[in-house]
Image (cartoon, rainbow, N blue to C red):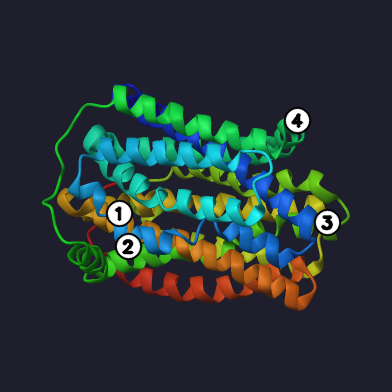
């Protein structure tokens, strides 16, 4: 395991991609904590808090379909730099004191439109940069992402209390600006991977590439199960208030799942490739199952433990993602990744928004999370059964 990670870091361009991703991830989570706390304090509504959180995800439903093809149409470095600069400017505008909440929401939506093409370009470039070290690099990226979530969420409350909402948003804008500089001067210039095509054709191509291959369809479905398991994120502030902890518990609740995923990612690296592939369905079920434990009305400590356990199992996404990428030709990789990722992010947004509405209807954030867990278990069992039937099919090695 260690050798694989060191081999990935031996590639200079990978180190640049890693640093840029780490900066942006930490900054993003600071902004999410700030917005969640701010909206709940002003409105006292679980529904509005969850819907605001969902605004960081739902724009991908449009952007991922329409814009992710840019990762194949234009040089991928240029796509990433442009996306980072756009987000830096918009977040700086959000940080201006006195900006009304509705305008902040609009700027947030526009900023999030840049995320899918950035992610598609980054994901498509990694295999080119790393070659046979790809999964080790992807594991490092996932661990870094989850560690960034952990740091941003756990320390977010303290940073917001220290800098205020505007200060946290300025910090986020700076992370994107620095990321753009690192990518522009640290990555080698490469030509566009694919030919220039019409938007409509790119949309159809990305969808067809995924849905014509049953293995790709199921790998995407395994990712989109996050629709159910993301619900606790959007309800962190309402649940923390529900158990009598208040804003101080929000960071711990949001950090629990990333902490578990870091541990799970490291542990899964000790298993052979074939076993990891066969375990994908079972681990998807195990990701949703702990949320059912909210039916017993756990306190803060119990809820954190359940979320951490769910996070450990969710590390299956590393192998699922590596297998998906290697099944797709490089010339169309950005479109396929964009389609899959936009669907994932949109599913998360729908899950968060739906969880907020359910919590408002039930009068309990904890009960809404438990119901989401039950639905997630049912859906993941169905996907796991289908995956078990195709996992014996020859798949590319992801070691």
Say the numbered circle drawn on residue 68.
Answer: 1
Give the distance between the C-alpha atoms of the residues marked 1 and 2, in whole angstroms. 6 Å
Task: Tell me where residue 201 sits by quadrant.
Answer: bottom left
- Which residue is drawn at the image coordinates 53% and 68% (left, top)? 350
Q: Which residue is mark 4?
A: 162
Task: Mark 3 vs mark 1: give the one in front.
Answer: 1
**C-beta proximity under 8 Å, tags 3 and 1:** no
Q: Pointer 1: residues within 10 angstroms few (<14), some, or many (20+)?
A: many
Q: Nearer the viewer, mark 3 or mark 2?
A: 2
N-terminal of the two: label 3 or label 1? 1
Spatial CA span between label 4 and label 2: 39 Å
1 to the left or right of 105: left
Residue at the left extreme, as displayed? 195
Question: What is the secondary structure assignment of the residue under circle 4?
Answer: helix
3 vs 4, front mark: 4
Q: How many marks?
A: 4
The picture places residue 260, in percent across and down from the top left corner, at: 60, 46
- Residue 22 in percent (x, y) is at 48, 32
Bin the neighbour count of mark 3 within 10 Å (Cα to Cα): few under 14, some 14-19, many 20 and up.
some
Whichever of callouts 4 and 2 sits on the residue coming sooner in the sequence is 2
Depth order, front residue of 168/99: 99
Residue at image x 68%, y 74%?
Answer: 358
Q: The residue tagged with tag 3: helix, strand or loop?
A: helix
Is 343 or 228 nearer to us in this picture?
Answer: 343
Mark 2, residue position: 65
Where's residue 207, x and y in %? Answer: 26, 67
- Spatial CA distance of label 3 from label 1 is 38 Å
**Between 217 and 238, the one nearer to me in the picture:** 238
Q: In the rendered view, tell whether residue 220 sits above or below residue 110.
A: below
Dots 1 and 2: beta carbons under 8 Å? yes
């Amino acid at each position: 395991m260690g050798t694989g990670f060191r081999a990935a870091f031996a590639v200079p361009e990978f180190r640049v991609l890693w640093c840029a991703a780490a900066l942006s991830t930490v900054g993003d989570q600071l902004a999410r904590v700030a917005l969640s706390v701010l909206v709940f304090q002003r409105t006292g509504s679980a529904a509005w808090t969850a819907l605001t959180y969902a605004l960081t995800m739902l724009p991908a439903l449009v952007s991922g379909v329409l814009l992710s093809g840019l990762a194949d149409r234009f040089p991928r470095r240029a796509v990433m730099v442009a996306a980072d600069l756009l987000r830096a400017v918009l977040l700086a505008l959000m940080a201006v004191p006195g900006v009304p909440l509705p305008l902040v929401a609009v700027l947030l939506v526009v900023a999030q439109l840049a995320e899918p093409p950035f992610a598609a370009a980054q994901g498509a470039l990694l295999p080119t940069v790393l070659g046979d070290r790809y999964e080790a690099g992807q594991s490092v990226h996932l661990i870094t992402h989850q560690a960034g979530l952990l740091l941003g969420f756990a320390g977010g409350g303290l940073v917001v209390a220290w800098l205020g909402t505007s200060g946290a948003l300025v910090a986020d804008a700076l992370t994107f600006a620095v990321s753009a500089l690192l990518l522009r001067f640290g990555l080698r210039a490469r030509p566009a991977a694919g030919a220039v095509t019409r938007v409509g054709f790119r949309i159809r191509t990305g969808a067809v590439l995924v849905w014509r291959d049953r293995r790709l369809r199921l790998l995407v479905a395994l990712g989109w199960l996050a629709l159910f398991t993301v619900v606790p994120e959007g309800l962190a502030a309402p649940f923390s208030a529900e158990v009598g902890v208040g804003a101080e518990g929000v960071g711990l609740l949001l950090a629990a799942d990333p902490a578990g995923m870091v541990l799970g990612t490291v542990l899964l690296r000790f298993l052979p490739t074939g076993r990891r592939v066969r375990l994908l369905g079972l681990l998807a079920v195990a990701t949703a199952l702990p949320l059912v434990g909210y039916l017993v009305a756990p306190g803060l400590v119990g809820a954190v433990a359940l979320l951490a356990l769910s996070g450990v199992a969710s590390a299956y996404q590393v192998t699922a993602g590596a297998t998906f990428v290697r099944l797709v030709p490089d010339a169309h990789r950005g479109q396929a990744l964009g389609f899959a990722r936009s669907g994932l992010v949109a599913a998360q947004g729908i899950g968060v928004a739906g969880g907020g509405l359910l919590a408002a209807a039930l009068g309990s954030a904890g009960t809404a999370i438990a119901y989401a867990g039950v639905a997630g278990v049912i859906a993941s069992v169905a996907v796991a059964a289908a995956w078990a039937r195709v996992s014996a099919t020859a798949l590319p090695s992801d070691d």
